[in-house]
Amino acid sequence: MGCASSSVPQSDISEDHSARKSAPQPVISEDPSFPKLLGQDVSSGIDKELLRLELTPLDLAMYTITGPVASMTLVAGWTEGMTAQLKAAIAKLVEQKPILAGTIRKRAEDEVPFVEAGVHKDFVFEIAGPEDFVVPRNTTDAIAMLQSWEAMFAEKSIGRFEQIVETEGPLFRVILMKLPSAHMAYVVEVNHMIADGASYYKIIDFINCAINARPLPELLWEAAPETVMIPDVYSQEDKDLALTGWLPAFMEKFALYAPGTNSARVVDVRVVDNDAVAAMKQEYLPSARAEGFDFVSTNDLIMAGLMELTDEGANGNMLANMRDRMPGITNNVMGNFERLVGFPASAAAANPVFFRSLNKTFVHWGSESNPQLSSEGGPKEAQVACNFATVTNWASLTHFIEPEGACVLGHCALSSFVTDVAGFDLAVVLKVDSKGTLAVMSNHLAGKRYEEIQERVSNSKVFQHLFLKKPDAESGEFASC
């Protein structure tokens, strides 16, 4: 269980998270000097902690297309004492969970790498911020500031998978940027091989609890069973399509929209209009009740709105956190316990209530009377063509490092988290400040890709009403808590 926190209000949004596709259960080292799974009884005197995890080729295929799971946060009311508290909390975290002090190694050039715990000792890096810093006027302004500093943070980043393997670099890091007027900006990075979005925010929650002298949440690293990631109704062909069938087309699209090209993906952050969302919930409530549901959620509307913008015949994907949604998969397990829930984008765009039924089983293709993912004449062709949009929802998971007396003015994922995955449309839903402001961060609502879909935006029934107009730079109150 997480510690009590007042920084992020709870919402009705589903726990859907960081962009990882399905992969088989990792192969744990057979070396008898290492426990096989966290929490498994081993010989006396050996801590019940995962010390070595061998990776499969499919794990590597998925995680090498993304950078670390990472976010940036701007905090007001920060003191030197809080920095000392933060460093002590991180020391406690890595002492208890040495996998975060690990690296990725190879025994030989042609062998599959493995994660080895307890290698690194330095986890906090401090950098100087801009001298001309001024307090942001609002949350949107605060996020824009964070994005303008990304290049400075990147100089201390743990880097991508290839860099970590080459240098045996760290899997976890916190970067602090001291700012004038008692402000601090920080970045927390965790390599995607050992953490999904839910695990990432549980790590942040642990640090925050330690700083604020609250009970520490239990974090239990385990290898996820295959059925967490791959529904048991999938055939072998379905599995192959879900895992790798889209990769050739992805690489072609990546070349078109890659960073540095004329059509490069551009990050966009839009704040959700709560009043408009409340009105649409009432509008679609009769339809929900007709299907036997009592409500329409904010997530249902965001998902439907984003699916309105997809290309013809596209599939949709929702990353769903499977903790507490499957037998034996408890809320405190760490690693990658999410499922890529695929569905026809057109059905989702037609009515937000579609997601109420999807959230009951977290499987569409191959369930009940639905076609298989490998069915000809639709889903298979879209998958092979990498014609899909993916949404990962961190909103109900979001935690901040927020010592008593401080408050978060702005929070967002690194821009590279969405722009580097250039081969398909990707959106992240998350809370972006201490007030619980909800926003959608994406790689297709600005730049060349947005020009391609702008007519769909104008014709949308849901999407065009989801967001506030961006505040004028010269107006608005100064950001506060």
Image: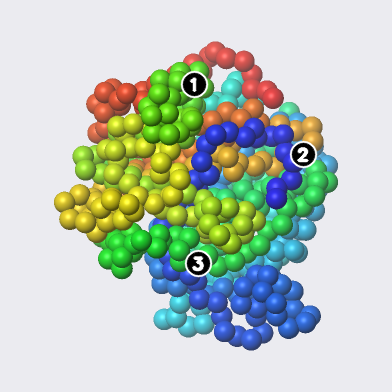
Q: Residue at x 58, y 40 (%)?
A: 396
Residue 80, quarter of the rendered image: top right
As shown in the figure, which amino acid type bears the numbered disc 1? Ala
How many other residues sit within 10 Å of disc 3, few (<14), some (14-19) or many (≥20)? some
Q: Residue at x 70, y 77 (%)?
A: 41
Percent position (x, y) of residue 229? 45, 60
Q: Residue at x 77, y 82 (%)?
A: 44
Closer to the N terminus: mark 1 or mark 3?
3
Tag nearer the camera, 3 or 2: 3
- Residue 278's tag is 1
Residue position for label 2: 403
Residue 347 at least partly seen: yes
Percent position (x, y) of residue 302? 42, 32
**C-alpha span from label 3 to label 2:** 36 Å
Residue position for label 3: 225
Q: Nearer the viewer, residue 57 or 138?
A: 57
Residue 384 at least partly seen: no
Q: Nearer the viewer, residue 226 or 178?
A: 226
**C-alpha span from label 1 to label 3:** 38 Å
As shown in the figure, which amino acid type bears the numbered disc 3? Pro
